[in-house]
Amino acid sequence: MYPLRPSPLPDSDVVLRPTRRDIDPSTGEPTAHALWDRHEWQPYGECWLWCGGQDVEGTWIGPVRSSGMHASLYACRPCLYELDQRVLDANIRADTHAAR
């Protein structure tokens, strides 16, 4: 029987998700898999997230339910990027917790 090679990962029990890169670090341009390519951007709208911007470039990101009422949820690019990073962080934490 052959001995196992050491894992290149710092902890073999931790599940790692690949991170998404929207911007190519060498050129500063959006990559082919950029988050922005998955949305239809409207030139003028309202951001319902952190900045609360009016007349900003925005996109519909889904329905929202609050206190039994429903509405369409819109976000600008910076707020959608922040939301995406928070979702990614939550998934990484859940993976780390599940591996313990």
Image: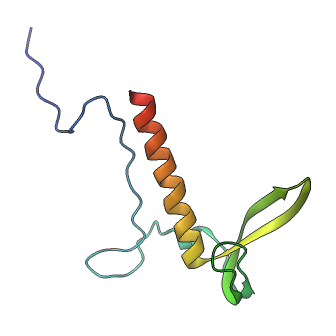
Please name the residue shown 29% across and 82% down the image. 27
Q: Residue furthest right?
A: 69
- Tally of numbered tags: 0
Please name the residue shown 88% across and 59% down the image. 70
Please name the residue shown 67% across and 88% down the image. 56
Which quadrant holds residue 72? Answer: bottom right
Q: Is residue 69 above or below residue 80?
A: above
Residue 24: percent from left, percent from top: 33, 74
Residue 8: percent from left, percent from top: 16, 38
Q: In which quadrant of the rendered image does the C terminus lie? A: top left
Residue 94: percent from left, percent from top: 48, 39
On the picture, is 71 further left or further right than 82?
right
Please name the residue shown 59% across and 73% down the image. 79
On the picture, is 75 further left or further right than 81?
right
Q: Is residue 95 above or below residue 37?
A: above
Using the image as rendered, state which of residue 53 and residue 21 is in the foreground.
53
Q: Is residue 27 above or below residue 62?
A: below
Q: How is the image coloured?
A: rainbow
On the picture, is 62 further left or further right than 82?
right
Q: Residue furthest left?
A: 2
Which quadrant holds residue 55? Answer: bottom right
Using the image as rendered, state which of residue 78 and residue 37 is in the foreground.
78
Residue 46: percent from left, percent from top: 74, 82
Q: In which quadrant of the rendered image does the N terminus lie? A: top left
Q: Is residue 5 above or below residue 74?
A: above
